[in-house]
Image (cartoon, grey):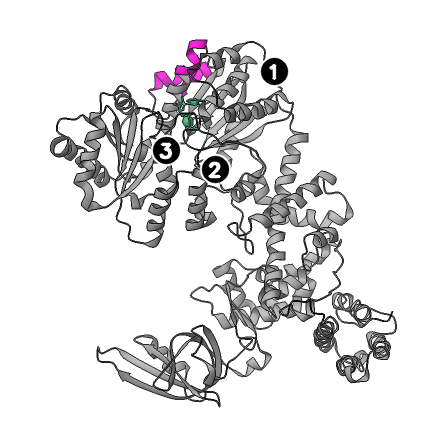
Amino acid sequence: MSDLGSILDIIQRPFQLEGKTEYQDKAVIGGLGAYVTNWVDKACENIPPEKTGLLKNLADLFRDYSEIPPNVRKARLQEASSIIGQLRGQASDAPEKPADDAPSEAKRVPVETSQDTDQLAALLTSVKYVKGIGPKRAQLLAEELGIHTIGDLLEYYPRDYLDRSQFKPIYQVGQSGEYETIQGVVVNQMEFTSRRSTKVLKVIVYDETAVASLIAFGKRTQYMKMSLKTDTKVVVSGKFKRSYNEISTSEYTYEVLSDEDAELIHTGRIVPVYPLTAKLNQRSLRRWLKEIVDQYAFYVPEILPLDIRKRQKLIDKSQAVKNIHFPETEQARKKARRRLAFDELFFLELGMALKKEKWGTEEPGISFQPRSDLLQKFISSLPFELTSAQKRVFAEIEADMKSGRCMSRLLQGDVGSGKTVVAAMAMLLAVDNSYQSALMAPTEILAEQHYITLTNLLEPIGIRVVILRGDMAKRDKDDALSQILTGEANIIVGTHALIQSGVEFANLGLVITDEQHRFGVMQRAELKGKGTNPDVLVMTATPIPRTLALTVYGDLDVSVIDEMPPGRQKIITKWVAEGKRQEMYKFIEDQIAQGRQAYLVYPLVEESEKLEDLKAATEMAEHFQHEVFPHLKIGLIHGRMRAEEKQEVMQRFKNNEINILVSTTVIEVGIDVPNASLMLVEHAERFGLAQLHQLRGRVGRSHHKSYCLLVANPKNTDAVARMKAMTRTTDGFEIAEEDLRIRGPGEFFGTRHAGMPDLKAANLLRDGKLLELARDEAFQIIADDPALTKSEHQMLKQILQEKWRENLEMASIG
Ligand code: ADP
Ligand code: MG
């Protein structure tokens, strides 16, 4: 037992228990005082006397340990930990050690994984008991941020940090062009009015090396004048400039220091910056968090099994909680974030794994078997050969359907990749087993399109396809409903109308949703509930970046059609400036002269089509008909038209009786007119990327060279980024990644996607790799211990039940 590191381990070992037992000095027999001094003496024997200074300091902290009150003991232990950290830093001063590693973390002995679920209780204490908060502010926290407990508050992570660990003397700043931090005292204020009659305030700060001027303009001057009176101590972080011997800044943040800052909450360290609301200020939040981190971070139980922590090189949970708020170094902050992000992703995936496991064991599905040559007949009736991607994906679906387990699979494929045919094949397999299939689409027009496509494909081989629409005449509706009920209808296509209460199926065996992220999981569930454990296939054309697929659809198996049918042309996409309109018309004219057709889309969202917008589209159609292309046939289609009207216009477009179809976004999905080779989008800057990509997917469906013209006048950088992405690539995955980058995950799916987890530390854009690691570990645990019955998994189970209850239910529906 000679080396210092091991002795430090021994010294530190009872600290945690001491904390858990409220600092009653019961962690070791004979008391911590005797224990620590004894071990310090041993350590001193082994190192040169000139290096024993810190060890002596450590021992000094414990000499009167048995006599001091618990709160003082606590402070002593904290200080002791910090000294031990420094000692470890010295001990491991080997050259390979990264210089910025947090000394107190080096060689830390990982804490044991807790199995005591009661430990979570301390974190459920109301924040109103925290020093400095009290009932009134607790209510404010609840109202403003939904924070009730200490655990909630501990999870209120900083949005940013200011590195105030290193102040620069003022005489040195202003040379690097970087942000720099100074600390000083206000010695003067000067106010004047600029030539353009703006108010200007100069606050002069002095730090015994030099003075710097903080410059403020206009409104800001009032507040600054109040808060930065002479003699105020202040920390300023900003970009400093030097000119005419003056050091000044007009790009800065500052904070007034008060006496409490002796504790170094707001300065002298890497300082957390919390997201604020109008009623909460930075300093209060920081103070409260400092208080609870000091008091309670200790109580945060270690929940991850040790082997996972070791494998994934994760620091202890309580350490992570402490360091996410008040990191000693940048390195420590990064490690803390990684650990906390891992936890979030791990629990998310643990939920997914459990759900998937449940699918496999608890929900017996229908075992569909090929009974006749129906499928074969269908495949040979197709005017084309299936792509190998289609064949592979169907084989995956078929394997699921044949097995006795419930299928819950995501079928992903870019627009035009041929998902519908694959879906039709799956439905045929169900029909072959005397089961019905339902296909639910997000819009009437898409349902209509599916209905036409499926009717064309399947009626020739004797399959009955019916459609159920919201706006059907009562007679037709009753007729459809009775066919669904009797089983006469083999395949039922529809919108939400399918999940209404009057709809009863004879024997629903397969549920397909074509969703474009438009259905909530609940709706999928309702449709599933119309059958008895039907198989579920979710089709989506918007390629989902893998990280998102793993979180939102993490409990589904995924099949990807990653190949386009042969002979497709790459769509040429151009961003057209308003000034080039005439040239563009000429180009359209040429294309139509060659026999092609064009779509012209106006940026209206179907559900919210306002009358004036419709008027614009209608006027545009008329303008085209009378002034631009008088000799061509212009058609108009929009969401306010009745289904039959829409149907009729579509049919005429299909028959090439209409050259240019002016439309609102109703054509966004599903329309299939191979001869149309030109897509013109007006006000393209108003569309989202996914939508633009969908629109573009309407062309390029044949061997004809195809074009997508985006007339756009973007007013912000996001819109410019969208136009650039569209012209750069036609790859749906790239588009989706870009979209995710521009909008962030929440927006990407929209509020309709209720399954989006609320991640606080993790970031789906950056943490793709961590997510996969977390997923592997989570699935491994569930594979070993499917019901989480092992004692070392009790904590996981408990947290999972509390934290993700809602999400589990959400995720539970394929
Ligand atoms: P998605 O639903 O994925 O957007 P569709 O199933 O609507 O794509 O198919 C787009 C077009 O490609 C349709 O006209 C369809 O008939 C055709 N198609 C599908 N599979 C193939 C194939 N293997 N070879 C040639 N054309 C195909
Ligand atoms: Mg389709």
For the magenta stretch, what is the residue range? Answer: 456-484
Residue 459 position (above or below residue 157)? above
Residue 137 position (above or below residue 468)? below
Q: Residue 661: x percent and y percent?
A: 24, 29
Image position of 206 (left or right of 166): left
Q: Can residue 786 be seen in this snapshot? A: no
Mark 1 lies on a secondary structure that is loop
How many marks the image carries: the answer is 3
Image position of 607 (left or right of 317): left
Distance from the alpha carbon under mark 3 to that under mark 2: 33 Å
Image-quadrant location for residue 1: bottom right
Q: Residue 481: x percent and y percent?
A: 43, 18
Q: Can residue 389 be seen in this snapshot? A: yes
Mark 2 lies on a secondary structure that is loop
Residue 458 falls within the magenta-colored stretch:
yes
Image-quadrant location for residue 127: bottom right
Q: Nearer the viewer, mark 3 or mark 2?
A: 3
Residue 570 shows which numbered tag?
Answer: 3
The residue type indicated by label 2 comes to Gly
The residue that mark 1 highlights is 369
Q: Residues within 10 Å of mark 2 (few under 14, many from 20)?
A: some
Front-lying residue, 416 or 316: 416
The residue type indicated by label 3 comes to Lys
